[in-house]
Image (cartoon, rainbow, N blue to C red):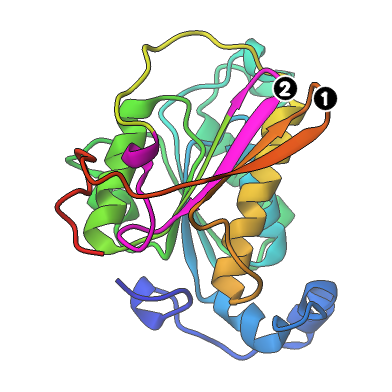
Amino acid sequence: MAGPGDAESGLTPRDLNDYDRSRYDRQMMVDGWGEEGQQRLAASTVFIAGVGGLGSPVSIYLAAAGVGRLVLCDIDVIDLSNLNRQVLYADADVGQPKASVAAAALRRLNEQIEIVEHVERMTADNIDDLAGSSDLIVDCLDNFPTRYVLNELCLRQGMPLVHAGVWGLQAQVAFLQPPQTACLQCLFPEAPPPSKFPVVGAAPGVAGCLQAMEALKYLAGVGTNLTDRLLMIDGLDGGTRSVRLRRDPSCPACSGTPI
């Protein structure tokens, strides 16, 4: 698997122009970022699995930061009940495909990057075609069977997965890069039963912004990612804690993969 910003991911690295230097000036001031980090972003492809409550802020901030190609995938259409948290959409969008509406909004946000949308379900049969050429995958899903499909792809390709989940006013975020770290199924060996869960829009907003930050750090080559840690945020009391993650030697997904 190509590293972030490698030409093998489908985008050719290019020199920055005056527009880039002006638009991305403030983030290039971050220690270690500079023009090289911005070039890495511009040459990167990120697959965003789901453009709902998490995928909205993730895609907005990755687009605003100048990631060269964003690939959006979501089978769902916009429902009125989505609008308390899925900030890419408005009342007039109800009934339309999320991926298509999101792609149009992101193209308006940054005309210089490429947005690819897929209105289809992610399965073991098509995930390589959808996401296999990406530098990184962001898990913005709300169901575990599809998350396991993403996890298996990441295991095969050594590709990072930025995971997040929300419940009510609580959120969790982790940066997983098996086999160097635990995989998603080490954390969640079995899928919990599907259910309708509470969520206040600010919770996926916070978690999605943290996912975007983790992705940008990795792609630009700055800072330290949340590897081997699960960051947990409790909006009810304003507390945070970090839980150490370890590979499960009996994990059904990665136990046969050497470290």
Coordinates of residue 248 in the picture (x, y in percent): 30, 44
Circles 2 and 1, Cβ within 8 Å, touching? The answer is no
In the rendered view, would you say 133 is above or below 100? Answer: below
Give the residue pinned by disc 1.
237
On residue 169, the disc is: 2
> Residue 229: where, in percent of width, then height?
54, 50
What residue lies at 48% left-to-right and 77% top-to-bottom?
A: 5
Identified by mark 2, the residue type is Leu
* Residue 220 shows up from this direction: yes
Please tell me whether mark 1 sits on a helix, a strand or a loop. loop
| Residue 4, x across and y down, in percent | 46, 74
Q: Residue at x 47, y 26 (%)?
A: 142
Q: Which is more N-terminal, label 1 or label 2? A: 2
**Magenta span includes 175:** yes
Q: Residue 169: image x %, image y %?
A: 72, 22
Q: What's the residue at 64%, 18% (across, down)?
A: 82
SS for dot 2:
loop
Magenta region: which residues? 166-187
Residue that sits furthest to the bottom in the current view: 15
Residues under labels 2 and 1: Cα distance?
9 Å
Q: Is residue 158 magenta?
A: no
Most extreme residue toward the top is 196
- Locate residue 258: give its quadrant: bottom left
In the image, is residue 207 above or below residue 182?
Answer: above
Going by the image, does 18 lie left or right of 247? right
130 displayed left or right of 119 = left
Question: Relative to 104, does residue 10 appear above or below in the rendering?
Answer: below
Residue 179 in the figure: left or right of residue 88:
left
